[in-house]
Image: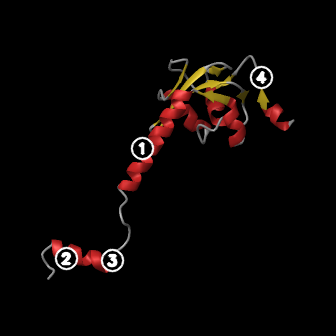
Amino acid sequence: MAVERMLMEKNDGVRLDRWLWSARFFKTRQNAADAVRSGRVLINEQRTKPAKTVRTGDKLQIRKAAFRYLIEVTVLTEKRVGPAIAASLYRESDESLQARRTLQEQMKAQRSSTRIQKGRPSKRDRRLIERLHGRGH
């Protein structure tokens, strides 16, 4: 019952920044508002303001870092909800989901191939460094 009270079918809509925050796209409402103001969030392919009313059926494009989300709002809420419930507030397009997964895998592969050793060099590494600098035997 408590979940149904938090999730509401309102015809008058909810502020965009509040919905983005409650759907867990941004950690704070201020971050959501800043993203909307800077054009990283579009409603129906148009720039808008944080106070713009979002309604069910609206299509949102959200850019966060390198990732792009293309979603359709299915449920409105003004309260921040848990991650499992937040995922049910919208429907993400298949192309968007696939593109994000592909990019995630590419970034993971790139990160693992460029791993740099942290800390002090081992004895073997130190000898190689000395040899490179011409101080070794």
* Residue occupied by mark 4: 9
Identified by mark 3, the residue type is Ser
SS assignment at label 4: loop
Identified by mark 2, the residue type is Glu
Identified by mark 4, the residue type is Glu
* Residue occupied by mark 1: 106
* Residue occupied by mark 3: 122
Looking at the picture, how far across and down is residue 108, in whole percent? 44, 49
Looking at the picture, how far across and down is residue 88, in whole percent? 70, 33
User: Distance between the Cα atoms at labels 4 and 1?
Assistant: 39 Å
* Numbered label attached to residue 10: none
User: Distance between the Cα atoms at labels 3 and 4?
Assistant: 62 Å
Which residue is at 15% across, 72% downward? 133
Crowdedness near tag 3: few (<14), some (14–19) or many (≥20) residues, C-alpha within 10 Å: few
* Number of on-image labels: 4
Examine the rendering and report whether any part of residue 108 can be seen.
yes
The answer to whether the residue labelled 3 contacts the one labelled 1, judged by CB atoms less than 8 Å apart, is no
> Is 112 rendered above or below residue 28?
below
Q: Name which of mark 3 and mark 1 comes first in the sequence.
A: 1
Image colouring = secondary structure
* Residue occupied by mark 2: 130
SS assignment at label 3: loop
SS assignment at label 2: helix
The answer to whether the residue labelled 2 contacts the one labelled 1, judged by CB atoms less than 8 Å apart, is no
Question: Is 23 in front, or is 122?
Answer: 122
Question: Is 34 in front, or is 71?
Answer: 71
